[in-house]
Image (spheres, rainbow, N blue to C red):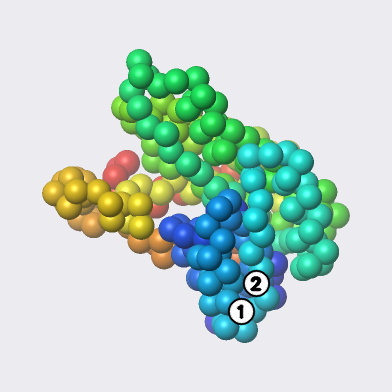
């Protein structure tokens, strides 16, 4: 059974990692996928081809989600290409980790801009369409760090905690129009980025997780699939921890 047959989905930051995993799972479930990338054009175009091979419509767009104007333009273009938008996944994000005493203002501002302001930009841009349709699911990518904090990540934790507050407020504002808004808080997910880390450190993290393994992009994508599909028709304003029990 294809849970997202003929639904039009937009995913920010999907050329690699978790975003790419979501795009692949969604296309396998019949969704047409519009996705953005910031600079990795080759992987984005390769993913576009891979998704199209699954028999769905797919298109990559270079866009800066941290820009209000660029987000407005992007949504206008996607609506021209896809006619409607049923699901928005705000996944674009960066880290610029450092202890507070060493963190520069620019590193704080940039993380807030890319991780948190982008969620405002894209949600605002897509809202009019979903209100007209009287239907829609918005999924925002938070983090366990946004729930519990983490030393050396004040900027990242603030941005991800902000996403949770934003999500709950949007759920309250748009619920009467049948528009749902939820957040996902991934734990330690193993992607291309974690491959660069020291194996001993990574194993130490795995050992501290009740399920004794890091998560995969598919683990997060399957949680998104539930929140994007009609299976979660009565679920809004929630934060779903996908963390192997880290926060238990």
Q: Is residue 49 above or below residue 237?
A: below
User: Which residue occupies 20% across, 55% down?
Assistant: 212
In front: 61, or 33? 61
Earlier in the chain: of badge 1 and badge 2, it is: 1
Q: Which residue is mark 1?
A: 52
For this orientation, the residue located farthest to the right is 132
For this orientation, the residue located farthest to the left is 200
Q: Is residue 203 above or below residue 158?
A: below
Q: Which residue is mark 2?
A: 58
Mark 2, Cα crowd under 10 Å, few <14 / some 14-19 / many 20+, is many
Residue 216: name its quadrant.
Answer: bottom left
Which quarter of the rendering shows the N terminus?
Answer: bottom right
- In space, the residues marked 1 and 2 are separated at their CA atoms by 6 Å
Q: Is residue 100 above or below residue 31?
A: above
Circle 2 — which element?
strand
Left or right placement of residue 233 versus residue 223 in this view:
right
Image x and y of residue 70, in percent: 73, 45
Image x and y of residue 49, in percent: 58, 77
Mark 1, Cα crowd under 10 Å, few <14 / some 14-19 / many 20+, is some
User: Which residue occupies 54% across, 70% down?
Assistant: 47
Left or right placement of residue 201 versus residue 240 in this view:
left
In front: 26, or 152? 152
Label 1–label 2 contact, CB within 8 A: yes
User: Which residue occupies 29% across, 45% down?
Assistant: 246
Circle 1 — which element?
helix
Residue 112 visible somewhere in the drawing: yes
Left or right placement of residue 63 versus residue 98 in this view:
right
Which quarter of the rendering shows the C terminus?
Answer: top left
User: Which residue occupies 33% across, 23% down?
Assistant: 99
């Amino acid at each position: 059974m294809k849970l997202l047959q003929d639904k039009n989905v937009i995913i920010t930051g999907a050329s690699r990692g978790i975003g790419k995993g979501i795009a692949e799972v969604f296309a396998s479930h019949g969704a047409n996928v519009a996705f953005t990338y910031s600079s990795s054009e080759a992987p984005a175009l390769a993913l576009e081809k891979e998704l199209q091979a699954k028999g769905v419509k797919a298109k990559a767009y270079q866009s800066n989600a941290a820009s209000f104007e660029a987000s407005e333009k992007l949504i206008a273009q996607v609506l021209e290409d896809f006619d409607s938008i049923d699901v928005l996944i705000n996944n674009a994000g960066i880290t610029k980790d450092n202890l507070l005493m060493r963190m520069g203002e620019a590193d704080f501002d940039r993380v807030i801009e890319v991780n948190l302001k982008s969620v405002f930009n894209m949600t605002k841009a897509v809202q009019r369409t979903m209100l007209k349709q009287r239907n829609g699911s918005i999924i925002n990518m938070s983090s366990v760090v946004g729930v519990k904090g983490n030393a050396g990540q004040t900027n990242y934790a603030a941005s991800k905690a902000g996403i949770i507050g934003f999500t709950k407020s949007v759920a309250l504002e748009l619920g009467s129009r049948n528009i749902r808004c939820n957040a996902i808080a991934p734990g330690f997910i193993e992607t291309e980025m974690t491959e660069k880390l020291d194996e001993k450190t990574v194993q130490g993290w795995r050992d501290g997780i009740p399920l004794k393994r890091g998560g995969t992009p598919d683990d997060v994508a399957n949680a998104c699939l539930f929140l994007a599909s009609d299976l979660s028709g009565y679920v809004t304003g929630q934060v779903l921890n996908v963390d192997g029990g880290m926060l238990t």
